[in-house]
Image: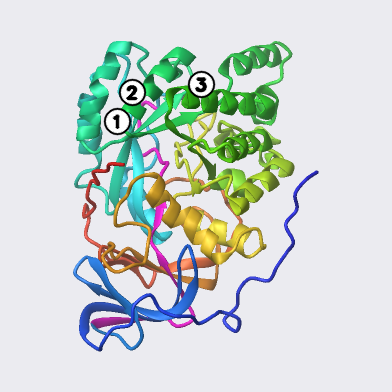
């Protein structure tokens, strides 16, 4: 049976609930006060003022005053969104050895326009390369470039067991999450290496992350299709069937159980994958699931020609049919899936083809609002949870993801009635395409504040270049 959520009206200005603020305080003056908006958290919504002192939230209450005051009436006031899965200025990411099109400098500005205040990218040591060497090189790519705070995962590509001895040193540098590929030549690890890596990560209390696809089956099916002259984006779902993804998710969960590791499954695209994560959670296993905005918003109809747009969206796991998309929304609604990210990995078009890689770093918050909240698939608080609060918890980003005194003043003012038609002209990444070209979203960020500093306001970026900081993390 295909799950189809009931269509419900989106919250309007007339129906928004006023509640009890988190903190009521005496009238004192703060550096910045966001006045009178609908504060939306992962638990509730209420009308209140949010006060900032320095880089932190100082109070949430009524009648607060500040040296600077922002009028948030008729707006949502949200914790800054966190995108825990991106690829910026990356010359190694498969399947093309071409740099991704967005740099830390350009993509972080675009993300800020989209209400994102924290990014998590990757260090990807080559086989034989010391892990810390690549980690430091990757930090040099971002430091002084990104306008947003950022963290890193480490992709473990080397199956040599000796490499595992370097993992504790990576933890010491504030990187406790490791991605393990079950697909792509040059990235894929055999199951034994995945198991050993999970054990090593678990011994340090970290998080194992997987790209779960059955690559052997995909390679075999791809060769058969090629022999029949069936090539191009429209055949991607046939080459990468959902049952093969579901099998890999099941296998990754089994390996994590044996290794006693906490596990996050990236970019689940199919009903079978959602089912496996839901079953694991029902058994009490520490398994988390991620959906990406392209799988939530687009369907395989976008792959049915051989044009550049279809080629750019020929990502893996594939964008699938509406029956799988409905299960992703259901998984977000009932907690089988935990977070929404973008896997932002756009590449510039070549002369005769467009390498795959979805864009979306600026659009995610608005897309999930439009296609999730406004359709009744998820509520306002769940929207904030999957885009802000849960990613902060999943990725151990302390002082992020919540509107609460003592937390970083990462705050977004979101106009729920603002219409934006997504295109290269309306978005801010310096790339010649948008994965969501022509889609109109209702609701878009209008002001972004990070660590107490307004960096996007009145349609302009007003922050300082390179102001972002590396975030050391630990679980």
Whether residue 363 is visible, yes or no, is: no
Viewed as shown, does residue 37 lie left or right of 466?
Answer: right
Residue 451 higher or lower than 396, as above or below? below
- Which class describes the residues within 10 Å of circle 1: few (<14), some (14-19), or many (20+)? some
Mark 3 vs 1: CB contact within 8 A? no
Say which quarter of the image contains residue 197. Answer: top left
- Which class describes the residues within 10 Å of circle 3: few (<14), some (14-19), or many (20+)? many
Disc 2 element: helix
Residue 92 belongs to magenta span: yes
User: How far across and down, in percent of the image, does residue 473 sit?
Assistant: 27, 43
Disc 3 element: loop
Mark 1 vs 2: CB contact within 8 A? yes
Viewed as shown, does residue 100 lie left or right of 406?
Answer: right
Numbered badge on residue 183: 3
Residue 468 higher or lower than 287, as above or below? below
Q: Quadrant of the C terminus?
A: top left
Distance, label 3 to label 1, CA atoms, is: 25 Å
User: How far across and down, in percent of the image, does residue 1 sit?
Assistant: 80, 43
Residue at (53% x, 71% y) in the render: 416
Magenta range: 67-95
Please tell me which residue lies in front, 75 or 327.
327
The residue singled out by tag 2 in the image is 200
Viewed as shown, does residue 222 lie left or right of 196?
Answer: right
């Amino acid at each position: 049976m295909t799950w189809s959520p009931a269509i419900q009206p989106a919250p309007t200005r007339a129906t928004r609930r006023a509640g009890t603020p988190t903190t009521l305080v005496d009238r004192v003056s703060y550096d910045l006060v966001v006045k009178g908006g609908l504060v939306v958290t992962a638990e509730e919504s209420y009308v209140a003022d949010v006060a900032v002192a320095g880089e932190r939230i100082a109070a949430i209450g009524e009648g607060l005053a500040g040296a600077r005051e922002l009028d948030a009436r008729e707006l949502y006031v949200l914790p800054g969104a966190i995108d825990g899965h991106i690829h910026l200025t990356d010359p190694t990411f498969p399947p093309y050895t071409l740099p991704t099109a967005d740099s830390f400098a350009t993509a972080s500005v675009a993300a800020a326009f989209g209400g994102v205040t924290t990014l998590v990218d990757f260090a990807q040591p080559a086989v034989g390369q010391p892990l810390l060497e690549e980690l430091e090189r990757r930090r040099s790519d971002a430091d002084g470039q990104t306008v947003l705070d950022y963290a890193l995962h480490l992709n473990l590509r080397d199956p040599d067991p000796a490499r595992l001895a370097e993992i504790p040193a990576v933890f010491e540098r504030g990187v406790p999450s490791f991605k393990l590929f079950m697909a792509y030549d040059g990235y894929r690890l055999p199951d034994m290496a995945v198991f050993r890596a999970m054990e090593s990560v678990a011994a340090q209390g970290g998080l194992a992350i997987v790209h779960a696809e059955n690559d052997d089956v995909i390679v075999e099916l791809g060769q058969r299709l090629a022999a029949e002259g069936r090539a191009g984006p429209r055949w991607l779902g046939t080459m990468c069937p959902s049952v093969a993804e579901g099998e890999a998710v099941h296998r990754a969960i089994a390996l994590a159980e044996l290794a006693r590791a906490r596990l996050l499954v990236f970019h689940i695209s199919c009903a079978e994958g959602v089912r496996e994560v839901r079953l694991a959670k029902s058994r009490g296993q520490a398994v988390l699931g991620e959906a990406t905005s392209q799988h939530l918003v687009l369907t395989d109809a976008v792959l049915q020609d051989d044009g550049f747009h279809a080629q750019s969206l020929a990502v893996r796991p594939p964008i699938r049919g509406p029956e799988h998309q409905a299960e992703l929304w259901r998984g977000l609604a009932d907690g089988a899936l935990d977070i929404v990210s973008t896997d932002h990995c756009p590449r510039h078009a070549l002369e005769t083809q467009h390498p795959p890689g979805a864009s979306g770093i600026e659009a995610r918050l608005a897309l999930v609002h439009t296609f999730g909240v406004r359709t009744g698939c998820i509520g306002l608080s769940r929207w904030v949870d999957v885009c802000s609060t849960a990613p902060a918890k999943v990725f151990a980003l302390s002082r992020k993801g919540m509107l609460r005194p003592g937390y970083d003043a990462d705050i977004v003012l979101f106009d729920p009635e603002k219409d934006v038609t997504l295109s290269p002209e309306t978005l801010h990444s310096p790339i010649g395409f948008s994965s969501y070209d022509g889609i109109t979203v209702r609701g878009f960020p209008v002001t972004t504040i990070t660590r107490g500093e307004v960096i996007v306001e009145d349609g302009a970026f007003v922050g300082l270049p390179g102001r972002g900081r590396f975030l050391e993390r630990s679980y």
